[in-house]
Structure formats: structure tokens, C-alpha cells
Image (cartoon, helix red, strand yellow):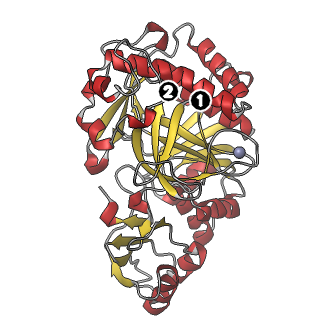
Amino acid sequence: MDNHDTIGEPDTARDFYNALLKTDHYDPVQLRGFQANVLVDLIAFAAQNIPFYRERLSAVVSPHGQVELERWREIPILTQTEVREHLAELRPALVPEQHGDILRFTSSGSGGRSISYYRTSLADIAQTAAQYRHFRNFKIDTSLDLAKIRAFDHALSRFRAPPNDPLKMSWTADWFNGGKGGSVRNLSVFIPREKQLDWLCGLGQVYLNTFPSNAYALARHLAQYGGNRPQIKAVISVGEPLGNHVRDAVLEQFGCPTIDIFSSAECGILACECHESGMLHLQSELGFFEILDAEDRPAEPGCWGRLVVTPLYNLAMPLVRYDTGDLVRLHQSCSCGRSHPTIDRMVGRPSNLLQMPNDDFFRPKIDRVKFGRLMGGLRWQLIQNGSSFTLRYMPTTSILKPPAEEVLSLLHEVLGADAEITLLAVPALGPSSSGKFLDVVNESKSG
Ligand SMILES: [Zn+2]
């Protein structure tokens, strides 16, 4: 399974990376041409090798195997439930040799069930190349170490042989940045915050890779209790929507920026933050993206739409018109001039956005600094259930409850004067088994 040292892979990765430096400057027509070339091959392969797709792709594949993309929008959208139910049927018996080995990824799904996804080496190389392009755009100094504070259970673990010396595992390939790859240092996100901060302080100058909720918790801990400040060059955020309050808190406490990468277990990297505008660019070289409204029509710029993606390189488990379950908002263009579709940096899911009856989704504009002060540092979570809201909080030995009247008045400002809001003390409030924590949850939309 471990093919990290296969001859040829570093060359392929470097070639891919160099290609991505060129396509970064493509105009929209060139970029669409690049995508269409790869997409046609993927569709032809899926129609021919995966019986599951034969009927589904009939609008774009002729009986002779000819692919014409004009009737693309007639291809049925693939839901997350369908993928879970037909996981085995989505895999071909064989993939062409030049796509390399098949790697397995496991993701802890909802309800603790883990799901395995498969990716070819080539699809994995494409991900790495996009990540390196992102590092280059942000002038990330990969000779520094990378501190990873994540959930190292089964979430997204990759089935590769561990390196001989785990302390010497470089976070970038030998050919990148003159081979000056710093080491990866790992710590579990379930370790108490003061211990995480101590550990970070002992590492010297590092990049920190963690969930936004954890970066925020660390910054808040420092603000509240003080202590030594770790030397963090930048926080590379993954796994959850990155709110402005996290960026602000990280900048204030660690004096560094937060850089966002938007990815998913099934599809890999979907979008990367633009180093000029701070918005996100969909990675058009890796996937064909559609943003669709409730009637499956292209969503208007500025309106929430479902992100539907066809990853271009993954022949090990082709996903054609896969509904990621994420809600995004398209922008007309980006100030950097790139042709890659630009989306708002607020990516949501119906489960972490609020929704008023007959209205669009929204993210509550809570001033988290002010609200945090009002709550006296108590951990909280705002839950919507139908038309009612509950603010859960976890009492501590020193603060039993927040000042109800003031808290309610602030929440009414955000949710409307008529909103039905209850305050509820709960014995425990913390990250899920995947290490993630969302402070806004829409329970009526949670699957
Ligand atoms: Zn841009």
C-alpha cells in the first residue's frame, strides 16, 4: 500500500505542481478547456468501468462511448446517502496503471460510524500540488516545523506505513522549497488547553495546523489566564468553517494570520484562500464545481447554493455531480484577477446556519468578544430547533450562570425581538469525538 517511495512519484508531483503554477494564470476559457479535457476522460472511464454510472451518464455518453458534455445538467445529482449506500459499487475493478496505487482514507462519519473512501495516487498528488501552490502563494516557510493539533483517532487517517523516525517526518516533499522541509509535530486536540499551549511554547517558531474552534479556544485561554505566548507564524485552519472572530482572536493573541483551506474527506481540497482578497478560490484544476439552488439551477452570485463537485482525478471512486452538503456563495470575481470561481469565505452547512421561516440561511452576527465577556468566559452553544432557540452553557465552580437579562437582550438583537430563546445549563459542552466544536447548531437540519 505504501507507495511513497515509488520511482516516478516525486517527478509526477513536481510536474503537477509546475502545471498548477501555469494554470493559476489561465483565463476562464483556458481553465474550462483544461477541466473539460480531464472531465471527458473521467466520464468515459466511469461509464465504461462502473455499472452504477452506466444509466446515470447516458445523457452525456453515446452508446458507442463518445462523451459530449452539452447535456451535463441532466446527469442526476449524487447524494451523500447514495454514496454511503453504494460505496462498493462506486469502485472500478481496476484503474489505469498511470494513476498509481489506491489509497484508503477513513473518515469518522456522523453517529460514530466510520466510512472508507478511496483515492488514486494521482488524485493524491493533485491534492498535494494544490496545497504546495497554496503554501507558495502565502510564502509559507516550510523549513519551520508544523505543529498539528488534531483528532488523531480514525478521522481521515491514511493507510500508509509510518515513517522510520516519526520526529523526522517532513511536511513537504524533498523537491519542494529546496528540500528544506521542517518536521511535523503531532498533538491530540483532546489535551487540555494549557498543556497544548505549553507544548507549543516548547517548539519554538512553528506553523499551527488545527481546527478553528481549537485555535479560538487557545487564544481565549491566553486572553483569560495569560501565560507564555507560543511563537506561531500562521495558523493553517482546516475542518470547520473559519469565522472572522477566530481570525481576530488569533491575530490579537498570537500576532499571526490564519490561512484557510476548505476540504472534505470524500473530495479532498475544494478551495483555498486567496492571498490577496481573503476569499476562497475553488480549485478548478482538481474538480468541476457547480453551485446550485433548491431547483438545481445555478445559484445567483451572493445567494447560498449547494456545492456540487465532480473530482477530476479520482478514478478509484469517481464521484460525478456529488452534493457535498456544503452551502457556499459565489462572487462575480476576485481582485487578484484569477479565473478560478471565487466563493465567500463563509462556508456553511444547513446544520451550522440558522434559518428563519421561509427565509434564506444566515449566520448570526454575534459579537463574540462582547458576548464572551458577558458570559464571563463560560463555554456556550446556540441551538436552533424549529422556531425556538436555546443557549446552552456550561457552569463552572466560579460562575454558575450568566446574567440572563443582558444575554437575552443581546440575543434578541441578533435573532429578532420575537425570537423564543431559552437559557439552559448543561453539565458538559465540548468537542465531538472528531475533535470539532460548532458554537451555532441548527438541530432541525442536522442529519
Ligand atoms: Zn483571488
On the picture, is 7 further left or further right than 155?
Answer: right
Q: Which residue has dot 1 on it?
A: 285
| Residue 221 sits in quarter | bottom right
Mark 2: amino acid: Leu
The residue carrying pointer 1 sits among few (fewer than 14), some (14 to 19) or many (20 or more) residues within 10 Å by Cα, namely many
Secondary element type, mark 1? loop
* Disc with the residue nearer the chain's start (1 vs 2): 1
Find ligand 1 in the image and state its quadrant: top right
Q: Looking at the picture, which amino acid does disc 1 mark?
A: Glu
Relative side of 201 to 70, left or right: right
Q: Secondary structure at mark 2?
A: loop
- On the image, the x and y values in percent for residue 437 come to 43, 59
Callout 1–callout 2 Cβ contact below 8 Å: yes
Residue drawn where x is 38% and y is 60% of the image: 351
Image quadrant in which the N terminus is located: top left
Q: Quadrant of the C terminus?
A: bottom left
Q: Position of residue 296 (x, y in %)?
A: 41, 48
Read off the residue under disc 2.
312
Q: Nearer the viewer, residue 81 or 359?
A: 359
In the rendered image, residue 204, in percent from the top left (x then y), is placed at: 68, 45
Closest to the observer, 286 or 255: 286
